[in-house]
Amino acid sequence: MITPMPVVVLISGSGSNLQAIMDACASGKINARVCAVISNKPGAYGLERAKAAGIPTHCIDHTLFSNRDSFEAALSQCIDDYAPGLIALAGFMRILGTAFIERYQGRMLNIHPSLLPHFPGLNTHQRVLDAKHHYHGCTVHFVTQELDGGPPIAFSKLEVNSPETAETLASRVLVLEHKLYPTVISLFAEKRLYMEDNIAILDGEPLHAPIDITQIQTRKIS
Ligand code: GAR
């Protein structure tokens, strides 16, 4: 058994994905440990979740910095103190700059609440309803310079019900997220997943499209 990979999780809010990741680490489902949680929002509930699990927390409030570069310099310094193998964005609602992304390229993941490449950006659930799409879900991808456009790794999907609201969709998608994100982090921690030349590689094969979580599960990840 290799040493658990240290993971820094960045959040801005409730931290339910963070909770799923912490739980999966604690139960040994993934060979990783959350070594720190950093929020850009002082009141983020995820900070309480981390404290309850005995994990170091930091708040780096972006509103206290005069520009993006100085905020991101402070963020990097805090991250680097933990020498993480992975940085997991879990509901982190700040757009990141070029130098920051470059620094962590290939070891920074994000979970996005849509079936990418559909609906990058915000308000995905309402936009899915407005567009009358029949399917929706979430995607985990490597973070690159393109907003929500880095190499996608895996997705989990559901059928849009009728009637359905943005709120019901958001909570149904979150349930999927809580399974998908730990699953993908597990693959990364086991070094079965990495990024090369802007392409995600899983078990030595380039992923030209994200794979369905059900296919990952049948590959027997754990
Ligand atoms: C999740 O739905 C996540 O996919 C989304 O924010 C929510 C955070 O929930 N992320 C984004 O929209 C990133 N652009 P959580 O704080 O309960 O994990």
Image (tube, rainbow, N blue to C red):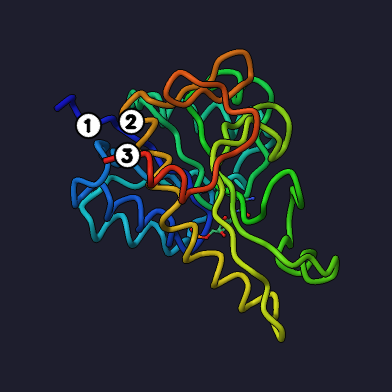
Three-letter code for the amino acid on which mark 2 is drawn? Ala
Distance Cα–Cα, label 1 vs label 2 = 7 Å
Mark in front: 3 vs 2: 3
Corner quadrant of residue 101: top right
Labels in figure, total: 3
Distance Cα–Cα, label 3 vs label 2 = 11 Å
Distance Cα–Cα, label 1 vs label 3 = 16 Å
**Residue 56, how many percent across, how many down?**
28, 45
Q: Residue at x 38, y 57 (%)?
A: 47
Q: What residue occupies the far left of the structure in this picture? A: 1
Mark in front: 1 vs 3: 3
Three-letter code for the amino acid on which mark 3 is drawn? Ile
Q: Which residue is mark 2?
A: 189
Give the mark, 1 or 2, whose residue is nearer the N terminus. 1
Give the mark, 1 or 3, whose residue is nearer the N terminus. 1
* Quadrant hosting ligand 1: bottom right
Q: Residue at x 69, y 40 (%)?
A: 148
Q: Which residue is mark 3?
A: 221
Tell me if label 3 and label 2 are in contact, CB under 8 Å: no
Residue neighbourhood size for the residue with mark 1, other residues' Cα within 10 Å, grouped as few (<14), some (14–19), many (≥20):
some
Secondary structure at badge 2 equals helix
Tell me if label 1 and label 2 are in contact, CB under 8 Å: yes
Q: Is residue 119 above or below residue 44?
A: above
Secondary structure at badge 3 equals loop
Q: Which of the numbered marks, if any, corresponds to residue 4?
A: 1
Three-letter code for the amino acid on which mark 1 is drawn? Pro
